Image: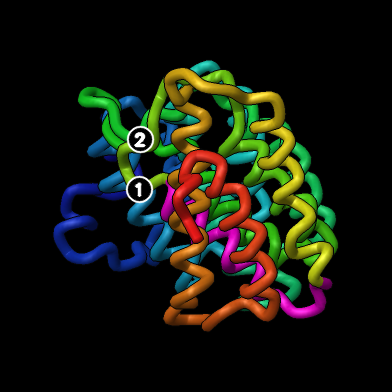
């Protein structure tokens, strides 16, 4: 690839110091171009690593909205790695916006949410890893973005809980979670449930989506979506019991855990 602006391997080897001689606008454009690369060394090890650090440190504040717009546009990109790295970029941008109020307009976050909410439950390529493309992780990356959207758009929290439920129960998959996708979803759900102001009904309402997905089920082999859902609910139960190191236990953890356990008794009828 071209090293028109900086020599990326050198930047990486030095721990990603920000190249002050290059304008944030030009850097943002080059990073965005690299983030669709099918080469995981370019996309992940260089572009995403640099973007995540420089966004967090505030070096790209003046181009945050442009970075977010470009990422959100990629939810309909024909190449899977472009789609699945878009939520990672949005997570970084939204987290920076939460840290520094005003740097990300609410209207922009709403615009990005529209694309994200359409893409997340409908993405068909949910593989965690590909031997050629490297990490794809649509489910895990989307979960991270969902938690960030919940911070940026508090009025969307119940929708985001349901969005995660729709993702885990999506029947159009033959992929069983193999790269801790269940844990990433459980962490995102726990982060959303930690937000103040949710009622018990709001904290548990999303589980209706899960219960409805199993309605009418019977004996036979467990389809991948059901395996994924059971794995996620088990992980969530653990998260609700232990809490998060950086947030504790959600206010409605007992009632949510009880509802989760009731669903898990479908496959585990021996539970007390």
Residue at x-position 17% and y-position 54%: 10
Residue at x-position 23% and y-position 38%: 41
In what element is the residue under mark 1? loop
Residue at x-position 58% and y-position 52%: 145
* Residue 47: % across, % down: 36, 46
* Residue 187: % across, % down: 50, 61
Residue at x-position 52% and y-position 51%: 233
Q: Which residue is mark 1?
A: 180
Q: Along the line of sight, which residue is nearer the eye, 157 or 178? A: 178
* Residue 203: % across, % down: 74, 64
Q: Is residue 222 above or below residue 256?
A: above
Image: magenta residue range: 182-199
Q: Which residue is mark 2?
A: 128
Is residue 252 in the magenta section?
no
Dot 2 crowding, Cα within 10 Å, few <14, some 14–19, many 20+ = many
**Residue contact at pointers 2 and 1, CB within 8 angstroms:** yes
Q: Is residue 265 above or below residue 80?
A: below
């Amino acid at each position: 690839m071209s090293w028109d602006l900086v020599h990326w391997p050198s930047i990486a080897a030095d721990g990603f110091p920000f190249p002050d001689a290059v304008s944030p606008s030009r850097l943002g454009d080059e990073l965005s171009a690299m983030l669709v690369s099918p080469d995981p060394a370019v996309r992940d090890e260089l572009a995403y690593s640099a973007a995540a650090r420089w966004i967090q440190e505030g070096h790209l504040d003046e181009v945050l909205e442009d970075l977010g717009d470009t990422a959100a546009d990629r939810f309909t990109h024909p190449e899977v790695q472009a789609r699945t790295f878009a939520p990672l970029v949005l997570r970084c941008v939204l987290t920076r916006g939460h840290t520094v109020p005003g740097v990300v307009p609410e209207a922009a976050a709403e615009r990005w949410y529209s694309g994200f909410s359409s893409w997340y439950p409908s993405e068909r390529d949910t593989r965690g890893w590909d031997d050629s493309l490297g990490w794809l992780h649509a489910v895990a990356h989307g979960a991270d973005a969902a938690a960030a959207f919940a911070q940026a758009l508090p009025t969307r929290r119940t929708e985001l809980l349901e969005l995660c439920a729709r993702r885990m129960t999506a029947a159009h998959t033959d992929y069983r979670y193999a790269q801790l996708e269940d844990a990433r979803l459980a962490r995102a759900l726990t982060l959303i449930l930690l937000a103040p102001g949710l009622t018990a009904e709001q904290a548990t309402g999303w589980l209706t989506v899960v219960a409805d997905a199993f309605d009418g089920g019977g004996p036979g082999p467990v389809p991948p979506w059901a395996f994924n859902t059971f794995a996620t609910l088990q992980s969530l139960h653990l998260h609700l019991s232990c809490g998060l190191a950086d947030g504790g236990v959600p206010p409605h953890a007992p009632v949510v855990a009880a509802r989760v356990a009731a669903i898990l008794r479908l496959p585990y009828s021996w539970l007390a």
